[in-house]
Structure formats: structure tokens, C-alpha cells
Image: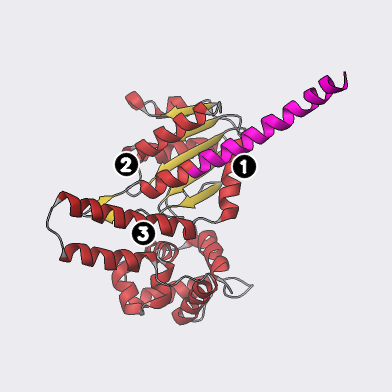
Amino acid sequence: MSSKGPPQSSEELRAAILDSYEDLSKRLQQIARYVLDEPNAVALETLAVIGERAGVQPSAIVRFAKAIGFESASQMQKVIRDGLIAGSSVLGYSERVRQFAEGAHARESGKPAEVLSEFVEGNVLALNNLRELVKDADLRAAVELIDEAESVYVVGFRRSLPVSSYLAYSLQQLNKKTIFVDGVGGLTRQQMQSITAQDLLIDVSFHPYADETIQAVQLAISHEAKVLSISDSLVSPTAKPATLALQVKEAEIRKFRSLAATMCLVQALVISYAFVAARAEGQARKPAGKRRKAS
């Protein structure tokens, strides 16, 4: 597909998938999303198992690998596997969650203490995975986007509402000009209409993605504003067009999906921005202090 040849690293593969995603068929996009979301499984499982979990035929995985530039699916798997080894990743998050779920089903009794234990264990897995999933460079870039924005718009509906409301509240407490887009009365578009190229939209969105959040992202882009997306997939309808996307994979316990990892990520962003803002404020005061001392 590329004149440069097949991707040589997991990072190059990730970039190649994101670059070509819109040109792929719906079936190949389905595989692309699985490869991005579950690299450990793709690296370590057979094509039959990958196909079953991704909901496609093994032959489609081969077609996908060739569409990205590989000669075979095994060549793609090797690139991902080499990346996992280089990153000292032992057992994939999805596999750990699967093992945890099997153990939870085996001891399922409905006792409140055991339910609490299940949620704690599941969230510990998700939090440990968050540390591996989100790169330092992306976190720094996200904080920089917040710092440089004239105004920060924050949107997130349904399950994402607690996170987005907390984020908006925290930024306001730090005296960052923040607009919380809550869409009350169906006014999402009206609340977004003043966003400009100097502003930033932060969206929090998970599958199934809220139409209001997608609409907000599209409006922000049409106004040339930057978008920081916090989502469960790098190719979600909110993350794919974003300036920067941070991926979060939450625990799912007894069919309930948690928000612990997402809230942890948002808190890290807020506190990191607080440090940046405090440093800037301190530097702004230094010249005045020197002048007083000289007099």
C-alpha cells in the first residue's frame, strides 16, 4: 500500500492504520480497530482466535495485513510481538481481564464483599494498563493543549458525564476559562457556537458514542479549534479526527463498565496543568520582585 514498504515497528503500524483507516472497507476497519485496541491478542493468538474475537473470518485478517503493506498476517503479528517484547509487556490487558472474569464467574455468589472485591480487582487491572497505554509524550502534549487554549470546552454525555463534569469543574477551580457543554434542552450546538481556532474542545466518549459528542467534535473542527479526545479507541468517531487522542480501556465487571481509569487520567491531566500554570504564574512575578529588591 505504501511505497516505503511495510511498517517496521508497532508505532509505524499504528500510524499506518490511522492514516489509511478512512480508505478501508467497513470489514477492514473493524479489524483495524481490533488491532489498535487489542495488540497483545493480535500478536500472540492464532488467526482463528483473532477472527473469532474480532467477529471476522481469518482470511479478512490476511487481507487487512496486505492492505497495510505486509506480505502476510504473520509478518504483521511479528512486528506487534517485537514491540511488546521491547516494551517488556508480558500478558495483554484483555487476556488478564478474561482470566479475571473467568475467576469471577467461578466464585459468583452475589455477596456484597465479593462484588466489591471483583470491582477492586478489575479496576486495578485497568489502572495498571492505563500506565502502559498512555505515553508520556501524549500526556505532555495534552497538557500543552490545555495550557495554550484561550478557552477550554468540555463535553461528555451518558456514561462519560461524571468525568466531563469533574474535568470542567476542576479546570474552573484552576481559573482556566472553561465552558461545560452539557447539552441541556438540546442546546449542544448553541453552547459550542462561540468556539474559535484559539480554543480547545476536550471530549470524553465511549462506545456507543453519543451523537451530541460527535456533533460537538465536528463543530469544533469546522471552527478550526483543536480537539483533545479521551476515548476507548483511537479510531472512534471522536478520536479519529481529533488533534490528539488518549485511549482508555476500562474494566467491565458483571456487564458494568467502570470509570476509574478515565477519572484517574483526567485527574493526572488537571494536576499536571496546575503545575504548568503555577510555574507560569511564578515566572510572571519574578521581574516585579527583582525591581522591588533593586529599589
Residue at 35 percent across and 65 percent down: it is 94
Question: Where's residue 262, x and y in %?
Answer: 41, 47
> Tag 2 or tag 1, which sits nearer the N-term?
1
- Image quadrant containing the C terminus: top right
Residue at 64 percent across and 72 percent down: it is 4
Q: Choose top left, top right, bottom left or bottom right for residue 159.
A: top left
Whether label 1 touches label 2, CB < 8 Å: no
In the image, 104 versus 139, the foreground residue is 104
> Tag 3 or tag 1, which sits nearer the N-term?
3
Whether label 2 touches label 3, CB < 8 Å: no
Determine if the magenta segment contains residue 273: yes
Residue at 62 percent across and 42 percent down: it is 144
In the image, 214 versus 160, the foreground residue is 160
In the image, 295 versus 162, the foreground residue is 295
Q: Which mark is residue 159?
A: 2
For residue 140, side relative to residue 246 (left or right): right
SS for dot 3? helix
Disc 3 target residue? 125
> Tag 3 or tag 2, which sits nearer the N-term?
3
Total marks in image: 3
Crowding near pointer 1: few (<14 within 10 Å), some, many (20+)?
some
SS for dot 2? helix
Determine if the magenta segment contains residue 255: no
Q: Choose top left, top right, bottom left or bottom right for residue 16.
A: bottom right
Q: Which mark is residue 144?
A: 1
Residue type highlighted by circle 2: Arg
How far apart, in angstroms, are the residues tagged by discs 1 and 2? Answer: 27 Å
Residue type highlighted by circle 1: Glu
Crowding near pointer 2: few (<14 within 10 Å), some, many (20+)?
some
Residue range corresponding to the magenta coloring: 268-295
Where is 83 relative to 215, above or below?
A: below
Residue type highlighted by circle 3: Leu
